[in-house]
Image (cartoon, helix red, strand yellow):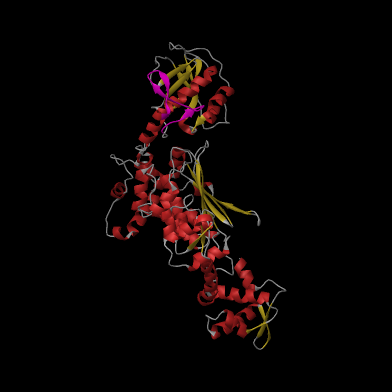
Amino acid sequence: MVDLYNWVGWSITHVTMFNIKESESIEFKESIGQIDDIAKTIVAFANTKGGIIYIGISDNGLPLKISIADSSFRKISDLNQSFDPKLYDSFSAEIETIDGLEIIKITVRKSTYSSHSYKGVCYIRQGTTNQKLSSKEIAERHNASTAFDWSEQTPEGSLFEWVDIIALDYLKSKYLDIYENKSKQLDSIQLLNTLSLLDVENRPNNTCLLFIGKPEITSKLFKGKNKITWIYKDELNGIEERLSVDEETKPLIFGIQNILDRINKFNTTLQDIDLFRNDVYQYDTKVVEEIIINAIAHRDWGVNLWVEVVQTPTSLEIRNPGKFRADLNKVLFENKRPEYLNPTLADFLKKMHLMEKEGGGLKKAYTTQIKKGLGIKLRYDNSGANPRVDFILEGRVSDIDFARFMFMSKGLTQDQVVILDKINSGKNIVGRDLTEGEYIIVDKLVTKTGRGGVSLKIQEHLLKKSKKYINSFSSTHASPDTSRDIILDYAKKNQEFTTAEVYDILNGKTKEWVRSSLATLVREGSLRRVSRGHYCFVTTLLTKHESNKNK
């Protein structure tokens, strides 16, 4: 048996009589040599209602003696490379024995995609033939397919027993923690119906099983697409950490929080001593949660791939299977998100307060990241065999002047933040990169340059003002640990310094606090007291203060 293509599972079934005729859902092929026609029929069935292809049956329904080898199944499996999008587990092959003769049976399930193509051509099943679709017909099918809600569907055989009771209890506690729900008295069935997680017969739908289904059920049911993977890679220090298989397949109600906890384990404070004198973390938890939730809400659950989170010391990527269907400018400036592929899933997330009720969540994520002087990038591929959308959060400041400006400009609106970031990134031509309306929003903060004044740049005096402000802000509002870092940073740059000098660089702190901090750093071995009011940095050993920071 072939194990190289385990998604095309195959087995042997014995049938004593064959009295089936070709129809809209049945097709006969005499041999595996008709592989091109077989591929067209697989696509046609997937695009219509599904169906079965029997290989080794004549047109009049008689079984034939054919040779079946591993290569036969390999040919069938390899067809997936010619389908766009790929069909993955939407078809499978097995051996059946009819009157002592072995034939191949290919079962094709209706796809959740609007249309698949083979060698660039889309087919549908009409009667006993495969018919080509025109470009107009493909577009019409795509527009009509938005009515299909995968998240609302009830899987075949679904039972309430498929629900993980611990996950259900946790879901109930989270729902009742929401202020407007605190006084509600709901049993489990009432709760799940309130959240649109059961069908009319109180059977769990796909959304229910994604979030609170038993892992041993959902792993088989969803073929792995229900999981979220996470990996942390620090190649410089040889560190790599990832989730276990059990963690990846947890119900999503637990899995999302588990991912956030793992990210926060390596979520460090920004280290630029000249910029952030108080503690500012690389990634805001609400920003990360919003992007992950958006990935779950907007992804195409017909694609048998999963959400991936890849973290390094300087970046965080959330990789989402499926096409990017939004207009990013409309999302950021008009709060216009695309229609949800799965409205039931989106409705559940809103009721659980896990996502914004309109398209403002992504805009807030962008604004929060940019306000720290950090980038956020969108990368997507809609034309490949496996379309994917990547959101990349940068964890290191690359433009100090712009970061200072963003960090100190507390009165900027969300629109201004996003537009200024656009200008600073080089997309600054009015009429090409920016609309006249966008220019008006930031006209008091930018200068027109170039011929005709079509290019924009942030006013120079604002960048200089922000640098001066940061220096003042730093010494006044810095946390105790950060203020001590300022002292040590100054000590490293000066062979010897006085208490009076520290008073000046930390003029927002009291003299008593400065003297106490200097005494503590001397006791810890970070500084040495040369004489009364004079100190120097201890360079021979790693200081205790630095050692504690590195732990």
Q: Is residue 164 shown in magenta?
A: no
Q: Nearer the viewer, residue 44 or 524?
A: 44
Q: Nearer the viewer, residue 504 or 443?
A: 443
Q: Nearer the viewer, residue 208 or 122?
A: 122
Above or below, 274 against 288 in this view is below
**Is 63 displayed left or right of 1 in the figure?**
left
Say whether residue 57 is visible. Answer: yes
Above or below, 75 against 297 in this view is above
> Which residue, as the protein is rendered here, is positioned at the far front?
452
Above or below, 15 against 478 in this view is above
> Which residue, as the protein is rendered here, is positioned at the far bottom?
532
Q: Residue at x 53, y 37 (%)?
A: 384
User: Toward which corner of the image does residue 239 lie, by quadrant?
Assistant: bottom right
Q: Is residue 126 shown in magenta?
A: yes
Where residue 362 appears, as percent x and y from the top left, is: 43, 53
Say whether residue 269 is visible. Answer: no
Q: Looking at the rendering, in which quadrant would you find the C terminus?
A: bottom right
Question: Which segment is the magenta one?
Answer: 114-135
**Is 317 displayed left or right of 295 in the figure?**
right
Q: Looking at the rendering, in which quadrant would you find the N terminus?
A: top right
Where residue 420 appears, as percent x and y from the top left, is: 48, 59
**Is 207 displayed left or right of 272 in the figure?**
left
Where residue 466 appears, as percent x and y from the top left, is: 52, 70
